[in-house]
Amino acid sequence: MLKAILFIVFFLVQICLGQISPEQYFGDSYDDAINFCTKNKKEFIAIFERHGIAEQISSAIVFPELIRYNRFRDFAETSALELLYIKHGKEVADFSIGRFQMKPSFIEKMETLLKNDYLMKTEFDRVNKYPTADSLEIRKIRLDRLKNQEWQFLYLACFIKLAEKAYLNYMDDNPENQLLILSSAYNRGFGATYDELKILSETKTFPYGNKHFGRYSYYDIAKFYYSNHSHKIF
């Protein structure tokens, strides 16, 4: 009992001193995220090598979402929201789905960007292909894809290529700068300026979002995983 109390006291002191790592802070949720990357190593390699993307970077971009998914999945009842989205669209219901916590609006934006980019449209031709022109059916299929792990990998690869192109003037050979841009853009969504991404990378609101302050930024988690675990897995 005394050992347990001393451990709790030590843990709280480390938090107050700012010396606890994301791995220690998120505990089982962090471990589960590591296990997901390890178990799905072949899937990461298969899709991202096909599109010339480093697995270490790609897994780091979504690693904070893997933690968030493991912490909040029991509360993620989406059946009613799915029906609202199918019937009325993203203006009425827009919500995070799956391990990578992607929203329908996020996919719709990618589909729009692909339509205006011939080369990207060719590389990711599956993304915009639907066997129907009916908008309700398309939204239903989009949701089914979002709940499918293979599609989430494809969507992530598509996002990375679109973001690399959008922030081409700021991308360099420094992996941490690449990760700052890509992870912050994934967290923020399309359309942010580079300066906005820099600010976001320093804003401590993970894992509850921009209405709540936390110990880490989204980029903090991605960078910690990238530096300490990604190269051991991939």
Image: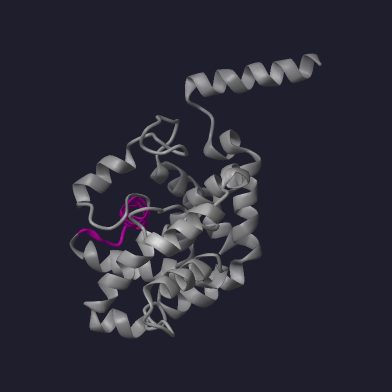
Q: Where is residue 54 in the image (x, y as percent from the top left)?
A: 44, 68
44 to the left or right of 123 = right
The stretch in magenta equals 170-186
Q: How is the image coloured?
A: one colour
Residue at figure coordinates x 53%, y 35% from the top left: 21
Q: Position of residue 128 (x, y in %)?
A: 36, 79
Nearer to us in this view, 196 or 16: 196
9 to the left or right of 204 = right
Nearer to us in this view, 143 or 224: 143
Q: Does the magenta stretch include residue 154?
A: no
141 to the left or right of 213 = right
Residue reaching furthest to the right: 1
State the quadrant of the C terminus. bottom right
State the quadrant of the N terminus. top right
42 to the left or right of 214 = right
Residue at figure coordinates x 33%, y 43% from the top left: 201
The main secondary structure of the magenta stretch is helix
Q: Where is residue 119 in the image (x, y as percent from the top left)?
A: 27, 83
Nearer to us in this view, 202 or 89: 89
Q: Total marks drawn? A: 0
The quarter of the displayed image where residue 169 is located:
bottom left
Q: Where is 28 relative to 167, above or below?
A: above
Q: Does the magenta stretch include residue 175?
A: yes
Residue at figure coordinates x 54%, y 72% from the top left: 150
The quarter of the displayed image where residue 214 is located:
top left
Q: Position of residue 208 (x, y in %)?
A: 45, 37
